[in-house]
Amino acid sequence: MKRYQPWLTLLARLVLGGTLLAAGLLKIKNPSEAAASVRVYKMLPVAIANILGYSLPWIEIGIALLLIVGIALKKSALAGGILMAMFIIAIGQAWARGLPINCGCFGNGGVTADGKVHALTYFTEIVRDIGLVILSGFLYRFPQGKLGLDKFATEENDGNK
């Protein structure tokens, strides 16, 4: 494990960061659609859902950039994991309540075109997000990897002792 861990950390950073970056960039193109995709979950008052919908793409992009370049990796991994856990809860409650929505994670939020609940869609979204939570946990536990700026800062500080 010791031999492969730095490469696995890099891969995990790129997968989690890349997913968050893609989701944020796709949502940022249409902020009103992003806000609508948060509202359809019917978990929050409209005003709070709108604020979250408009700010969520920026939060995702910020966490993604930190993960990809490897800055503040434990904190950004924790933030990414918390975000994914929130998505799991939101999707799970929508599925349990029978709300006919698509995830909205990649900029296509809102009610499904046919107005039906698609269990397989909810299930695959939740499984994907569980996988991303596992990756964030791995990154939190093993933050030192290849090509991460945190690693260089740590090596520099260790050399000065």
Image: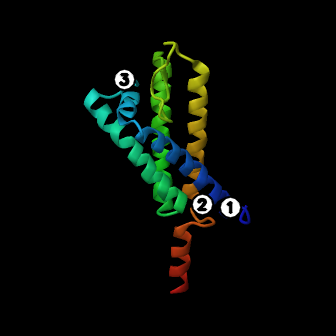
Query: Which badge, 1 or 3, is on the more N-terminal residue?
Result: 1
Q: Is residue 54 above or below residue 6?
A: above
Farthest-out residue, front? 29
Q: Position of residue 107 (x, y in %)?
A: 47, 34
Q: Which residue is mark 3?
A: 42
Q: Residues within 10 Å of mark 3 (few under 14, many from 20)?
A: some
Q: Which residue is mark 2?
A: 142
The Cα atoms of the two marked residues, 1 and 3, are separated by 40 Å
In front here: 12 or 3? 12
Which tag is nearer the camera, tag 2 or tag 3? 3
Q: Secondary structure at mark 1?
A: helix
Farthest-out residue, left? 47
* Location of residue 134 (image quadrant): top right
Q: Secondary structure at mark 2?
A: loop
The Cα atoms of the two marked residues, 2 and 3, are separated by 37 Å
Query: Which badge, 1 or 2, is on the more N-terminal residue?
Result: 1
Q: Position of residue 25 (x, y in %)?
A: 46, 44
Q: Residue at x 74, y 66 (%)?
A: 3
The three-letter code of the residue at mark 2 reads: Phe
Q: Residues within 10 Å of mark 1 (few under 14, many from 20)?
A: some
The Cα atoms of the two marked residues, 1 and 2, are separated by 11 Å
Q: Which residue is mark 1?
A: 7
Q: Residues within 10 Å of mark 2 (few under 14, many from 20)?
A: some
Q: How is the image coloured?
A: rainbow
Q: Residue at x 46, y 43 (%)?
A: 24
Query: Which quadrant holds the N terminus?
Result: bottom right
Query: Which badge, 2 or 3, is on the more N-terminal residue?
Result: 3
